[in-house]
Amino acid sequence: MRFFLLLVFFLSAKAWACGYCVEDKIAAVYEHAAVSRSLAGGRTVVFFAIDGELPPGAAASAKTRARIEKLAAAVPGVEPGSVRVSVEAAALAIAYDPKRTGLAEVQKALERKLKLPLLAMQVMDRPGHLAAARAR
Amino acid sequence: MKHACLLVLAVLLPACGPSAPTDAYDLSKMDLKPVPSKVTAERHTGAFAEGAALNLGAELKPLDPSPVKTIRLDTTHKIIEIAPGVKFSAWTFGNQVPAPTIRARVGDRIKFSMTNRSDEAAPGVRLTAAPMMHSMDFHAAMVSPQDKYKSIAPGQTMEFEFTLNYPGVFMYHCGTPMILEHIASGMYGALIVEPRNGYPTKVDREYMVIQSEFYAKAPPKSDKAGIYTLDGERLRAAQPNYTVFNGVHNGMVKNPLAAKVGERVRLFLLNVGPSKTSSFHVVGTIFDRVWLEGNPDNQLRGAQTVLLGSSNSAIVEFMIPEEGSYIMVDHHFANASQGAIGLVSTAAKPPATELEHHNMPSVEATPSDAEAARGKLAFESKCLACHSIGQGRKLGPDLAGVTKRRDAAWLTRWLKSPETMLQTDEHAKAMLKEANNIPMPNQNLSDAEIREYIKYFQWYDAQPKGAVGAPMAGH
């Protein structure tokens, strides 16, 4: 229920025009080479906002990033090598195979593993097409 | 009939009297009607910049009278030359740094579109910056940043529109985090908004001058392409190594802005920073008018210098009193010595001697080695007051041939501690005598800087005679 509410919150642009923040978070974890590789392999790239509290400070930031990257990479369905994390922007990008799993499943598994709530912001399933994230 | 005449008079008379002053800043009359932005995957191809209101260089075209300005500025990643031999990996709007200047007036509608083409390889050039997301932030617009200034991915196109409500000279820049990096990499330009009824003065020349900083890191020796990249440490510490007008170190010294005696010149100034202020001054003249932020309602008269913080602007106007080259300079001379200098000249190509006072170089040839190139720039900025290279003795010796007269170890000791050498070394003592006992001051150079100077002197001495012009001697 909470996820549904958050998703509605993100998707209702008129109620909350948060495009700026969303795009900035995406920019922080957008790595063109990784995105291009994933899309070429038929994967879907999804950009999440990390909704939980992250430890402040540069040293903590590096540690936290490494920890999240490791945990996220171990989640079933997440494409190996596709995880990108920005602690400063509180954002996470991963790619998954839409033939094998769906966004909702991947998100649930990530949240369980990371022990952090995530907000799916936008997805990309072909080059240049960023679209609002919807449970698939 | 009588009543009819009186009625006509009653209607006409008020219109003949002094009209009530209109408020140019009446918010209720401003166009704030939002039109949602549009993001698509339809890519622009062909030219990176399009629009009749665009000006690609310093010289400005007259205002395009069309009330709707259609502007296209695509983002690219490109190698630019910010100083002789310093090729820098830049990010651009319209494939140039600074980006084209847009000229419009209050009430005009700007219809803007931009494709993120940072993933397109420039022909023949190796890109060093990976494609990334970019956005556009127009300071001249009154719009929701959440809607209009969204970042777009490579291959996406953003379109939005807005009406210009205030006159001024406004910055535009990429607003994608880290914004500091995007601006320092070259993503900025100016949007000139003229007052609805034009400027209150007439001028003969109009130029755009944009001051900016570069934070360039030299390539490793193994990098044969020799591309400088953004130096993150310098950037965060606000320690640029180039501060320039219109994107090029000393660029408008080599290509001065033209003006004739008796002409009135209008400069549109914008300091984009990202982190330094500008104390803009023109040697040899006084600003008859200064319009802070480019708005004639913010007027100063008889000003010598204009202080511009990051993203501040001004319009300055001055007369050219006699033949000569009038030196535009950031009077914060640490910035000027990094390249923030230019000329407004009555001669198409000013004689090199005119630059003497400001220690500017006139050479075109430049070392390809990065260390030697840095040594050359440092020499031209700091040493020409007392030395020449190939132009004869000044207060200190002519440094042409210095690496043939002294070896690198001696030069290193000398540059490191001239005061010690003057007590212990016979050559140094003889030089002091030749200089009428005026000692060479210790410049507090680092080992790396000393190495760069020597590399430059070695390069100079290795050139065939006459192949390299001499930098101008200073005062």
Image (tube, coloured by chain):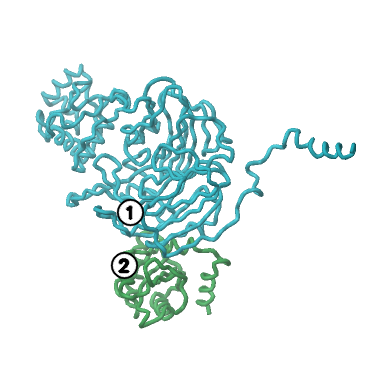
Chain colours: A green, B cyan
Question: The disc numbered 2 marks a residue on which chain?
Answer: A
Q: Distance between the residues labelled 1 and 2?
A: 18 Å
- Secondary structure beneath label 1: strand
Label 2, on which residue? A34
Residue at (58, 67) in percent of width and height: A15
Amino acid type, label 1: His
> Which residue is at the far top?
B436
Q: Position of residue A64 (x, y in %)?
A: 36, 67
Residue at (41, 63) in percent of width and height: B42
Question: The disc numbered 1 marks a residue on which chain?
Answer: B
Residue count near mark 2 (Cα–Cα under 10 Å), binned few <14, some 14–19, many ≥20? some
Q: Where is residue B435 in the image (x, y as percent from the top left)?
A: 19, 19
Q: In this view, does A49 lie to the left or right of B108?
A: left
Residue at (51, 44) in percent of width and height: B104
Q: In this view, does B170 lie to the left or right of B430?
A: right
Q: Which of A110 and B54 is in front in this view?
A: B54
- Secondary structure beneath label 2: helix
Q: Which of B57 and B445 is in front in this view?
A: B57
Q: Position of residue A22 (x, y in %)?
A: 46, 64
Which of the labelled discs sits on residue B77, or is there none?
1
A74 w.r.t. B256: above or below: below
Nearer the observer, disc 1 or disc 2? Answer: 1
> Which residue is at the far bottom?
A100
- The answer to which quarter of the image holds residue A93 is bottom left
Q: Quadrant of the C terminus of chain B?
A: top left
